[in-house]
Amino acid sequence: MDNAGLLSHTFVFSSLSLSFQCPHTKIPPIFFTTKPLLPARKATSHSNRSTPPSSPVCSSLDSSLPMETPYPKPINTAQTRVGFVGIGVMGAAMASRILAAGYFLTVYARNPSKALTLQSQGAQLADSPASLARQSDVVFTMLGHPSDVRQIVLGPNGILSGLNPGGVLVDTTSSHPGLAREIYAAAREKNCWSVDSPVSGGDIGARDGKLAILAGGDSGVVEWLTPLYNVMGKGTYVGAPGCGMSCKIANQMIVAANMLGLSEGLVFAERAGLDKQQWMDAVRGGAAGSKAMELFGGRMIERDFRPGGYAEYMVKDLGMGVDIVEEDDERVAVLPGAALNKQLFEVMVANGDGKLGAQGFISVIEKMNGRSASG
């Protein structure tokens, strides 16, 4: 395919400026009061919980327990109840860190067997997103696609149907800015709060607690969440509802560009007769060095394509930047590099490699140069 074919569309992008000031920052102040709290229950040690890790669903959870630290009551490990929906590679690592920090954690998984490891660490298992929400002060989600977020959050048995007044939803999915604003509005109608907080750093960052957390929403709620953010990485407030998602889309454009450059550099170095690891060690301290090289360069060389996030998600993320149509609440931009990278990731998916990690992108460049997947 020639360049004209690759760039034959007009590409647009959602609302984001370099100062991270979204065009939706004029949110009127909202005030509410919470009911007097009942006495807090005694903190429970994870190691002393009676629920066996192999229990498929924890039916002993008492959903009548009062919320103990609804916003703005300070978060603390003894009282704050955390929920987590979406415990794949990224979500499970994030949830594990929450448990290790001493928080009471409830999880939901459509396939309960995926929760066994977390249950063995002390997590409880709910039988629905709504049930989980009723038992939580803060609910995190880490899902695959915006359609999953809509179903899990806004569906008839979704999180917002069970979340109590003062509860806070934190969506860490890479999702659409418009959906984040829709969820924020729906949460406020219930006297709850929603923060869009997509993350960057991959599975290594999730395991090590070094994620960059990009938070959009009410600044006071974002600051209140700091103790939980600090368990997983560093939270940064980037603007009004939806701005966290816009920030992540822009982040993914840079990641994709780095993946392309790193892949081409490695393929060229090999063709030139250079030792790939030696080449990478030589250039990493200069302008070519990047976080992408640090996280993925070694994996590319070792052909370790195990996913932190699926490569097919890059198609989704880049698409939310280049495929949107102009609307009253969106700003548009022409993004030829992001459009090209989206199409190259689509080639990777078409090759049957969409479930590999994004570092498997090098396989696309290798195949263009006559190397087979096993070569």
Image (cartoon, grey):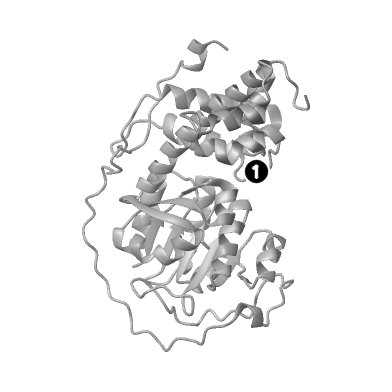
Would residue 100 appear left or right of 163 to someone viewing this image?
right
Q: Is residue 178 above or below residue 117?
A: above
- Residue sitting at x 44%, y 59%: 170
The answer to which quarter of the image holds residue 226 is bottom left
Q: Residue at x 21, y 50 (%)?
A: 26
Q: Position of residue 71 (x, y in %)?
A: 36, 71
Tag 1: residue type? Pro
Residue 354 appearing in the image: no
Q: Secondary structure at mark 1?
A: loop
Q: Is residue 47 above or below residue 176?
A: below
Q: How many other residues sit within 10 Å of disc 1, few (<14), some (14-19) or many (≥20)?
A: some
Q: Is residue 161 left or right of residue 215?
A: right
Q: Residue 1: x, y in percent? A: 58, 12
Residue that label 1 marks: 307
Q: Position of residue 345 (x, y in %)?
A: 58, 29
- Inspect this view and state whether residue 234 appears: yes
Whether residue 160 is situated above or below residue 69 in the rendered picture? above
Quarter location, residue 29? bottom left
* Residue at image point 57% right, 69% down: 99
Give whichever of 282, 340 is nearer the camera.
Answer: 282
Residue beneath the point at 50% across and 12% down: 3
Please tell me whether residue 299 is drawn above or below residue 44 in the rendered image.
above
